[in-house]
Image (spheres, rainbow, N blue to C red):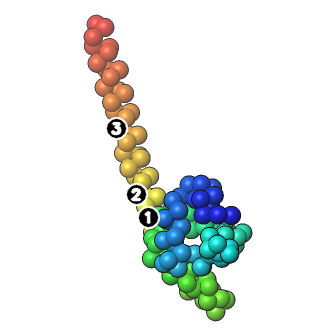
Amino acid sequence: MKIAEVAQQFDISSDTLRYYERIGLLRPVARNASGIREYGESDLARIEFIKCLRGAGVSIEALTAYMRLLDEGDGTLAERKAILEQQRGLIQQRIDEMQAGLARLDYKIAHYEDLIVATEQKMQQ
């Protein structure tokens, strides 16, 4: 699959894919005789994983460290797990903060609904 097709499939730019390769998130992508990148199934799986974790807010630095360890093999299982656990904790903290913000918004919306109803009732009297 060529870079434009991959970019479209994952809704990311070709520049982002090149950047991911340059910083080591992606292994060097195979190229055809013309020098054009040809993404294989393992590349696509890796991009899907990266996109999912980036969407969850995992930092480029954490992902880069994780991918480097992944490429080093099974001797890094504990280190990879530690990175994932740390990132999970950070994501859970953000979720908790967002839930608190959502609860505050729900409270304020209900408060305004009560005020609107009370104002409408006064106007009808």
Compared across the picture, whether 35 is left or right of 99 comes to: right
In the image, residue 115 sits, relative to residue 15, either above or below, namely above
- Mark 3 neighbour class, 10 Å CA radius: few under 14, some 14 to 19, many 20 or more: few
| Residue 3 pos. (x, y %) | 60, 63
Q: In which quarter of the image is residue 4?
A: bottom right
Q: Residue at x 36, y 45 (%)?
A: 104
- In this rendering, the answer to whether 47 lies above or below 99 is below
Residue 66 tag number:
none
Q: What amino acid type is highlighted by mark number 1?
A: Gln
Residue 42 placed where, x, y %?
69, 72
Residue 125 visible in this rendered orientation of the protein: yes
Q: Which mark is residue 93?
A: 1
The residue at 53%/79% (across/down) is: 24
- Secondary structure under the numbered disc 1 in the rendered image: helix
Of 61 and 87, the residue lying toward us: 61
Label 2 Cα neighbours within 10 Å, binned few <14 / some 14-19 / many ≥20: few
How many callouts does the rendering have?
Answer: 3
Label whose residue precedes the other's in the sequence (3 or 1): 1
What residue sits 37% from the left and 27% below the top?
A: 113
Tell me how far mark 1 sits from mark 2, CA to CA.
6 Å
Say which residue label 3 marks. 108
